[in-house]
Amino acid sequence: MWTAFTSDQVRQAEHALMALVPDGELMQRAAAGLAAVCARLLPGVYGSRVVLLVGGGDNGGDTLYAGARLAARGARVEAVLAGSRTHEGGLEALKRAGGRVIEAGEVGAPDLILDGLLGIGGKGGLREPYATLARIAAESGALVVAVDVPSGVDSSTGEVAGEAVKAQVTVTFGARKAGLLVDPGAERAGIVELVDIGLTAHLPEPEITALTAADVAGLLPVPGIESDKYRRGVVGVLAGSDRFAGAAVLAVGGAVRAGAGMVRFAGPEDAVHQVRARWPEAVTTLLKEDPVEEVGRVQAWVLGPGMGTDERARRIAAEVLGTDLPVIVDADALTIVSKNPKLLHRQAPTLITPHAGELGRLLGVDPKDIEARRIEHVRRAVEELQVTVLLKGSTTVVAEQGRPVRVNTTGTSWLATAGTGDVLSGISGTLLAAGLAPYDAGSVAAFLHGLAARKAAEGAPIAALDVAVSLPDVIRHLRTAANMDA
Ligand SMILES: NC(=O)C1=CN([C@@H]2O[C@H](COP(=O)(O)OP(=O)(O)OC[C@H]3O[C@@H](n4cnc5c(N)ncnc54)[C@H](OP(=O)(O)O)[C@@H]3O)[C@@H](O)[C@H]2O)[C@@H](O)CC1
Ligand SMILES: Nc1ncnc2c1ncn2[C@@H]1O[C@H](COP(=O)(O)OP(=O)(O)O)[C@@H](O)[C@H]1O
Ligand SMILES: [K+]
């Protein structure tokens, strides 16, 4: 499990650790780790040109000491001093090692730029001259490595208020900062390298976690010797309408390929025909005025993809949410519950899977605010709605009362195509029917969904159904990597 922390949590842990080690020791550990990563990234340290963007705080100090280490190994290291003050010891070390100070206009096109403008002390949008330096870094064509945090990214939330550095790699010290895992910050951070400075024992409970491949392999339901289709879990899918029959095919596809014991599908005529044609293994029911219980026994329901919001859909939603079975509430069902929030007042496990627009309607908040501050809003949704919430988007996050927010790290922007959300609800439904709690079902589903999209895309466009089709390959790979028997 990955863990991530707010800047306050990191500062408290640093204070505790600082009391136990000599003055300046932590900065030296940070700088040594940073210089080592830079040395790995450069084709050769000797003779390369490295520019340091140095702010007035300790983030600038780390950067200067790392620059000194690279200069000592033969790099040509130059520093732009952007703060109203400069870390004296760091600057002295750099100069002693042969580094020099330059003006912003002399940055040019170095091999590597180290962004040491702001670390966890950064607040709000970048002020000048930092904002201009962020632009210079972007235009330089150099490899940009952020020191601890890309400057301009809120290290606790991932919020970017204005200009920010965009790094290819972020070298972060002691603990992952939450803002490095959540967009828009995550996108600015690039690949995150964690440098151990001895902080781990001093860290509190994390506010943010992320599943790793090994965690997911451990959580995946696998049929035992005595399993049968019912014991593996039957998932019921209520999706599709005459207008959106495709959503039914996609949700059923996600459920089938994620490993359901059985998928029962119920919907209008066209949706039933299309589901049968693509997924003959699904057991289908034509649902007109009949009660949902006619569909047969299931362990969990997927409710909503493409089902519409008419009287028929509202009746089905009310009936399903009135049962004591676990339910995934997605898409049109979210529109229905946003008009009648009482439908979510239920005891049984409930996972809602909105994108920012849908959550915006549920909370009465502008979707742009939700995308800017996902963690805050997903937590608020859990408080107000008292259900488990999976918020979709460029970073998918899953939240539940009393648990850290789980951030998904596998997403890819190739997923931004119509219908992929329907596949995700099918996957989540299968996991819920197999007995996973909504928090695990949602976060494992998002992980598999992202990996399956990457596998299907491999750098080229995909259709939503490709994501469902890739799921078994991804699951096989995860289990093999975790050394699990067939
Ligand atoms: N603590 C430890 O044990 C260790 C810490 N380490 C390192 O220290 C880093 C934290 O250092 P830090 O606390 O000095 O803060 P840092 O981010 O460098 O600068 C803050 C200054 O910037 C300014 N400023 C703020 N916002 C701004 C804006 N938008 N635009 C422009 N300016 C802005 C603000 O100035 P003010 O506005 O207050 O005048 C403030 O003074 C941490 O990330 C890690 O790299 C490591 O060495 C490991 C051990
Ligand atoms: N830029 C992006 N990066 C990563 N994943 C994305 C991005 N945009 C969308 N997604 C993912 O694609 C899926 C889209 O779902 P949704 O918005 O419900 O679309 P639809 O209703 O068409 O299926 C979600 O899982 C979401 O997290
Ligand atoms: K930085």
Image: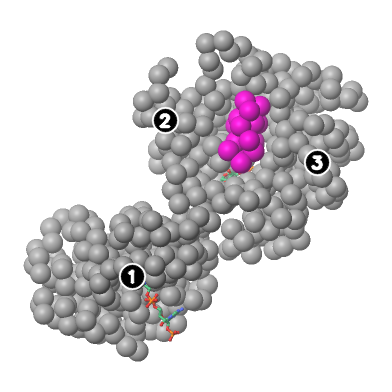
- Name the side, left or right, on which 463 lies relative to 55: right
Residue 357 appearing in the image: no
Q: Amino acid at mark 2?
A: Leu
Front residue of 423/36: it is 36
Q: Secondary structure at mark 2?
A: helix
Q: Dividing the picture into quarters, in which one does residue 344 lie?
A: top right
- Name the side, left or right, on which 328 lies relative to 215: right
Q: Eyeballing the image, is 26 above or below 440?
A: below
Residue at numbered disc 3 = 346
Q: Amino acid at mark 3?
A: Arg
Front residue of 120/162: it is 120
Number of residues whose C-alpha sits closer than 10 Å to that of mark 3, classed few (under 14), some (14–19) or many (20 or more): some
Q: Give the residue displayed 53% in from the left and 15% down from the top.
A: 224
Picture disc at residue 158: none
Mark 1 near mark 2, Cβ–Cβ under 8 Å? no
Figure quadrant of the N terminus: top left
Q: Residue furthest bottom?
A: 84
Question: What kind of secondary structure does the magenta stretch mostly adopt?
Answer: helix
Number of residues whose C-alpha sits closer than 10 Å to that of mark 2, classed few (under 14), some (14–19) or many (20 or more): many
Figure quadrant of the C terminus: top left
Does the numbered disc 1 mark a residue whose Cβ is under 8 Å from ligand 1? yes
Q: Give the residue displayed 64% in from the left and 16% down from the top.
A: 231
Residue at numbered disc 2 = 478
x, y percent for residue 229: 63, 14
Q: Secondary structure at mark 3?
A: loop
Q: Of circles 1 and 3, which is in front?
A: 1
Q: Secondary structure at mark 1?
A: helix
Residue at numbered disc 1 = 18
x, y percent for residue 455: 43, 34
